[in-house]
């Protein structure tokens, strides 16, 4: 998100750059166009003055020279006319000035004349500069006004869009409060509001139907599973069965237990999604971990060592705290070598558990997804770590995994800062 730019700023920036480019190009064009027009006007003055002197000479009038503005000289040879710029010293200003010079050669009344007319260019350059400066000033003021006017107008125009965007950011499936969307007289924004309302209402309806379906399925599964379990118990107790039948019935019982555990985990996940765990207490997680470690040790399921550096207290639902600890420890036992020690380290804000592993996981990014199993040979529902992640997300805890020195390491940071 660091490279993203707000819409108003981006449109204003485009307007600014486009305006500056337009101002620069128009100023350059105006400069050369005005300069061209001034030079044409200056040359017209030179040609007009030369024509008057020529007419005066043809009429037999005596034309006096007025250097350096007008010079009329008799010459022996006629040459081509010359139009050029020249530098002439101005005694009044005591400096060299630029003049536009036009020299023409004419044969008048049998005599050859060189008629030279000069006009000072400096005044026309000052005039040109004044025009360009005034244009830049007027254009600059107009540009600043239009820039701020355009920006404020865009902010006002896009306000319904921004407000509706903020409402969308606050949208939550768990909240039944309707979206407070703003109406706009802009057709596209009005259509966007309608589509947002249609989409969010449909998503909420689908979510409620899915939630109700999950709750109904979980609830309805409990009764037939209990009936099947009771009938199997009756078969075992009431009839003599051979070893093959006993193995088959035992396998069925295990499958029923898996279904019960799966149903229980799905129900818990559904309740977490629906924010049904509202009880928050200050839980001594160190004590819960110690009790779990002692229980697993009594069952002789694995070797475990807990090293509490400090007492770990966490504010959360007690039932979810027990599930969080139990699932992490059960997962470590499930994938650990029975000869290796499972190590648990806790302090005042974190819980770290590590177990031995031959190799790193192939897809660690999928580890906390529902029903994900690294291998089909693993006898797992694929929900234990998904529940851990869901509980951590609920309380804004941070759970992570890494593989280091042939050990799978799971860490939970309970600090929400």
Image (spheres, rainbow, N blue to C red):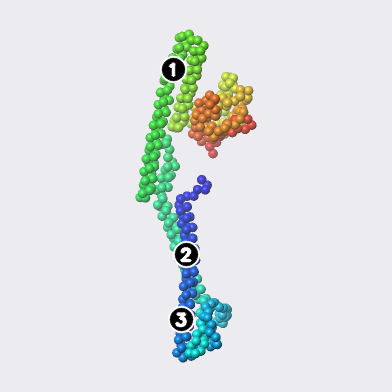
Residue at 41% across / 34% down in the picture? 207
* Alpha carbons under labels 2 and 3: distance apart: 32 Å
Pointer 1 or 2: first along the chain: 2
What residue would you read off at disc 2?
26
The kind of secondary structure element at disc 1 is: helix
* Alpha carbons under labels 1 and 2: distance apart: 89 Å
Other-residue count near label 3 (Cα within 10 Å), few / some / many at <14 / 14–19 / ≥20: few
What residue would you read off at disc 1?
228
Pointer 1 or 3: first along the chain: 3
* Position above or below: 354 against 251: below
The kind of secondary structure element at disc 3 is: helix
What residue would you read off at disc 3?
48
> Quadrant of the image for the C terminus?
top right
Residue 347 falls in image quadrant? top right
The kind of secondary structure element at disc 2 is: helix
Pointer 2 or 3: first along the chain: 2
* Position above or below: 104 against 370: below
Report the mark closest to the observer, 1 or 2: 2
């Amino acid at each position: 998100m660091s490279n993203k730019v707000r819409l108003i700023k981006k449109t204003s920036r485009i307007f600014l750059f486009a305006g500056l480019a337009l101002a620069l190009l128009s100023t350059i064009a105006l400069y050369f166009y005005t300069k061209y027009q001034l030079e044409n006007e200056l040359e017209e003055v030179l040609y007009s003055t030369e024509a008057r002197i020529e007419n005066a000479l043809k009429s037999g009038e005596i034309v006096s020279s007025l250097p350096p503005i007008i010079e009329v000289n008799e010459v022996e040879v006629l040459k081509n006319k010359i139009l050029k710029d020249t530098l002439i010293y101005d005694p009044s200003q005591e400096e060299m000035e630029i003049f536009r010079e036009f020299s023409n050669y004419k044969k008048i009344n049998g005599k050859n004349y060189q008629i030279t007319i000069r006009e000072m260019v400096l005044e026309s350059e000052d005039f040109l500069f004044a025009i360009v400066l005034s244009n830049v000033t007027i254009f600059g003021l107009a540009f600043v006004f239009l820039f701020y006017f355009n920006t404020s107008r865009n902010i006002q125009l896009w306000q319904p869009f921004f407000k509706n965007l903020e409402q969308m950011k606050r949208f939550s499936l768990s909240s039944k409060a309707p979206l407070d969307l703003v109406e706009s007289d802009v057709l596209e924004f009005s259509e966007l509001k309608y589509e947002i309302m249609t989409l969010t209402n449909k998503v909420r309806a689908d979510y409620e139907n899915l939630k109700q379906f999950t709750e109904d399925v979980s609830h309805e599964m409990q009764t037939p599973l209990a009936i099947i379990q009771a009938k199997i118990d009756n078969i075992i107790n009431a009839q003599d069965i051979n070893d093959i039948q006993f193995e088959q019935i035992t396998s069925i019982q295990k499958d029923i237990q898996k279904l019960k555990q799966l149903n229980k985990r799905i129900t818990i996940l559904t309740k977490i999604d629906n924010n049904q765990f509202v009880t928050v207490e200050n839980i001594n997680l160190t004590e819960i971990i110690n009790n779990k470690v002692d229980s697993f040790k009594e069952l002789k399921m694995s070797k475990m060592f807990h090293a509490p550096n400090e007492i770990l207290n966490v504010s959360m639902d007690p039932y979810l705290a027990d599930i969080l600890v139990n699932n992490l420890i059960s997962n470590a036992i499930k994938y650990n070598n029975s000869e290796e020690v499972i190590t648990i380290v806790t302090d005042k804000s974190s819980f770290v558990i590590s177990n031995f592993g031959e190799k790193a996981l192939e897809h660690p990014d999928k580890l906390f997804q529902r029903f994900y199993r690294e291998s089909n040979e693993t006898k797992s529902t694929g929900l234990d770590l998904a529940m851990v992640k869901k509980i951590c997300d609920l309380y804004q805890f941070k759970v992570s995994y890494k593989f280091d020195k042939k050990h799978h390491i799971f860490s939970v940071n309970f600090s929400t800062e």
